Image: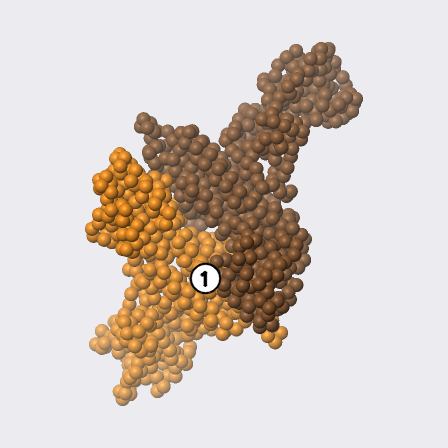
Chain colours: A orange, B brown
Amino acid sequence: MRQSQMFIPTLRETPTEAESLSHRLMLKSGMIKQLARGIYAYLPITQLVLNNIQDIVREEMMNIGGAEVHLPVLHPRELWEESGRWEAYGKELMRIRDRHDREFALGPTHEEVITSLVRDELKSYKKLPLTLFQIQTKFRDELRPRFGLLRGREFIMKDAYSFHIDEDSLDKTYRDMYDAYSRIFTRLDLNYRAVEADGGSIGGSHTHEFMALADIGEDTIVYTDESSYAANIEKAECTPPKERSTEEMLETEKISTPDIGTVKELADFLDTDLTLTTKTMVVKTDDGLKMIVIRGDQELNDVKVKAYFDTEMIDMAADEEITAELNAAPGSLGPVGSPIPVYLDYQVEAMRNYPVGANETGYHLLNVNHERDFEAAGTGDFRFINEGETVADGSGPAKFMRGIEVGQVFKLGTKYSEAMDFNVLDQNGRAKPVLMGCYGIGISRVLSAIVESHHDDKGIYWPKSVTPFDIHLITANTKDETITGTAAEIYDILSKNHRVLYDDRNERAGVKFADSELIGLPVRIVVGRGAKDGIVEVKGRLDEESAEVRITDLTSYLADNDYA
Amino acid sequence: MRQSQMFIPTLRETPTEAESLSHRLMLKSGMIKQLARGIYAYLPITQLVLNNIQDIVREEMMNIGGAEVHLPVLHPRELWEESGRWEAYGKELMRIRDRHDREFALGPTHEEVITSLVRDELKSYKKLPLTLFQIQTKFRDELRPRFGLLRGREFIMKDAYSFHIDEDSLDKTYRDMYDAYSRIFTRLDLNYRAVEADGGSIGGSHTHEFMALADIGEDTIVYTDESSYAANIEKAECTPPKERSTEEMLETEKISTPDIGTVKELADFLDTDLTLTTKTMVVKTDDGLKMIVIRGDQELNDVKVKAYFDTEMIDMAADEEITAELNAAPGSLGPVGSPIPVYLDYQVEAMRNYPVGANETGYHLLNVNHERDFEAAGTGDFRFINEGETVADGSGPAKFMRGIEVGQVFKLGTKYSEAMDFNVLDQNGRAKPVLMGCYGIGISRVLSAIVESHHDDKGIYWPKSVTPFDIHLITANTKDETITGTAAEIYDILSKNHRVLYDDRNERAGVKFADSELIGLPVRIVVGRGAKDGIVEVKGRLDEESAEVRITDLTSYLADNDYA
């Protein structure tokens, strides 16, 4: 394609409003333009890359037996009421009324629509399993759209949904998807990790996130160099301490602590280490208030608490609620004599003679011991893991890194089939709710993730699998007929087997070279003064120097150097 | 692909709610499912066909130098206010508010967005011409969605926009587009005509519609067998009569016609032919009321009237307005003594001694003659053409047919560039508004048009260019291992070079055959009892009989018969 026919409005200056590297590079290389906050137009280079990404995703989905569909953007309110998400989804769900005053959502995800679509048609286990996927524009009214395509309000997703009669079948498709995702991200040349992630109230190992490593990543991934272990920090398990304190139990003592509101103040007051103190927290769950005691230096992990209590609702109890129920200020709470159930983090369970609030405002108890002084209703893992701790598979110390979530696979179980009355007859003629899985890839996010990891100080360099063109052919001077004639000939020849971007613009060579490095095609061929002697200059995007190549040798040179 | 993995919910019964043949067939063959009025899910067969259609469209757009983009669905209100269409578009424009109460339109077309996108980047004629296109879901809140995908509220469009410094450049791209559209519709195997269409107030030959012939078509096309002439009836020119009446002018006579309200009643009362009478109509334009006189047997053509007066607004005057201005009831109007300008249709201009209303309720004038009895402000073509009349190029008698609009090419001129302040510097350094063209293809409409014209009483038959699969491979009996083994082998071999749908379902042969004819792949291969002797049955979708073919000869047989 002739560059004069493309629309690639590169910038000379680095745009200052961009908040991430990929955002800056995509603006600078003329790939995207913002129309409104979090809403972007994809210009020709972007569209070519997106088409390539989509082809790879489509191919791998079909390889595991997925059938492609295209579902509506407009979702009737009634469907989202069936699942209960019309209310629950909140302000991120964009809502619209049609001319007859009927309400619709702009689809941010398609569980409701796909379930309503197949439940009328699939009545027997014989039609299962089934995997449907689509690639489509989705909408989410983010409170703070940012980082360009990384967190937009209008974005492109591949979403897939699978339907099963039993867990074994769901497991198989889940594994197929996991493997397909691994192939996809490998083909896209992303440095990724599949990590255990929070699956909301479903919990367990029912979901994995595929994270592309990047400094801009909004998620923290816990990994270790000793094994393939990786998990989102929200999910990364802390192992119970191997050793328990064997200290002799000392006598409990009640002390006055009128000015102490935080655990830090308590440790200072007692002149002891934070690791020897405890924090008592009260959370609200579907099943009422629960008290949780963790070590003083640790942070409570909401996601783990939510999964532990298998609760939809999870919130810190308000001060009024605490005072009403426990008759003490939040800074003086403790497990001894608590009227609500007490749960201990594994670390606290291994401790002895620790301080706790006295459940009396302005007082603490020292040398408290569970079992002797109070009974815990349960113990568990309620905190975030720290760098250096041994990871859950026991293989080595935890390290942290940042990642961009580019995909997620998820076992939904019967959540939607039960809410939306989707049953099939099993082998014994009994109606059974269908098991479902859902599997997403953020296509426009993937694009950003590729840019985040494929650039140098001059611009982008595209992986061959998604590059918008194979070859950048450039005339150094459009006034010289030998040069333009030679370039046109080379263009015709190379176009037979390659996708060539031919910079025929009447611009200075320096401008063309700078644009070329910004755009980042794998190889650049410059037709300049050497043309009269049958010579052109060839340079791989990451090469330091260009090579002089005889035009007659050009095709074999490109092949030999694996340029195109 | 294995049919057990596809989702093709065919119906045994013909759905009664469907209003068009393509709608019925697409429901019956499991291609689409309605989610809400005018909003459909596209199931796997449909998606495969759509991907093929889109590939053809994309290829032809790129062949004429178009660059693909992807523009947002959400359009800020401010942009549509710049063009004046936020108000003008009416209820068909779907509108939404985000969480910050900002208003957006769901894009039904992208003139505003594309103009705002390029105006900041294109500052010089040197960057022109430029053609950008996209393939995207669009939204139009139709008052009466119907005919399945033919008139939906959410639909897929290819839209292209071109930008030019002068008319010559616009003309060239317009012709390139016209030719590309012709190639596209030919490749899609549509029987189509490119017709002159109404271009709204731009008028002239600035727009052509591409109409696919089909009985369900909502448009009437005027054509002739004698030439390539074709036009939408709204636009088809009527030629002025060659002969003018040479009757002697008779004396005007005023008669009482108290019970006469229609021209039919007048003709009966005068015992004369309708063709010798006239009708007087009053229309409201931007420039006030206008009186138009046409022959009594003809129908007024709004679109022509609108173009004639170059008016945005066109409406029949209300009775009160007529009475207020002309002091007579609508049934008694006439040009003699009219206080508003009078325009004659060409046919009336050729008449003499005709009756008209007297502009006095309950009275008519006989033997009226223009020039003698009143002065016309103008003459023109204000009516619809009739079958049998000579068409505008003079080549032969007009014939009518019905068609589905599948594409339109349109010279916008400077309408949007002027409204939205989009200028470039020309060769002389002067700012000039950019000339624009826009070019649409209704991708999901095209799909319906193909089905409307490719079916028999058993189902669809797909053109090879868009067929979802090349070959339908069917096992007649899934319990017979020779059959299933042979089919699996054939599937593996044929899949190397063809897209094969392999019906491996445990269904009766009759069900599979009926489904196969509904789905309509070009050729069907049945593996049945003959398998043990190395024989299968091959039948082209439109063949009456199937042929027995040795499996060893299968590939060459398919090629020789041009089946796949």
Percent from the top left, x then y, of residue B286?
54, 27
For residue A212, what is the image quadrant? bottom left
**Which one is in front, A526 or A462?**
A526
Q: Residue at x 39, y 84 (%)?
A: A375
Percent from the top left, x then y, of residue A84?
52, 62
* Kind of residue indicated by mark 1: Met
A144 w.r.t. B164: above or below = below
Quadrant holding the N terminus of chain A: top left
Q: Residue at x 34, y 39 (%)?
A: A4
Chain holding disc 1: A
Q: Is residue A91 left or right of residue A433?
A: left
- Residue B531 visible? The answer is yes
Residue at image mark 1: A61
**Which one is in front, A504 or A426?**
A504
Percent from the top left, x then y, of residue B95?
49, 45
For residue B241, what is the image quadrant? top right
- Residue A32 visible? The answer is no
Residue furthest toward the bottom? Answer: A248
Q: Is residue A513 left or right of residue B188?
A: left
Q: Is residue B453 left or right of residue B208?
A: right
Percent from the top left, x then y, of residue B264?
74, 27
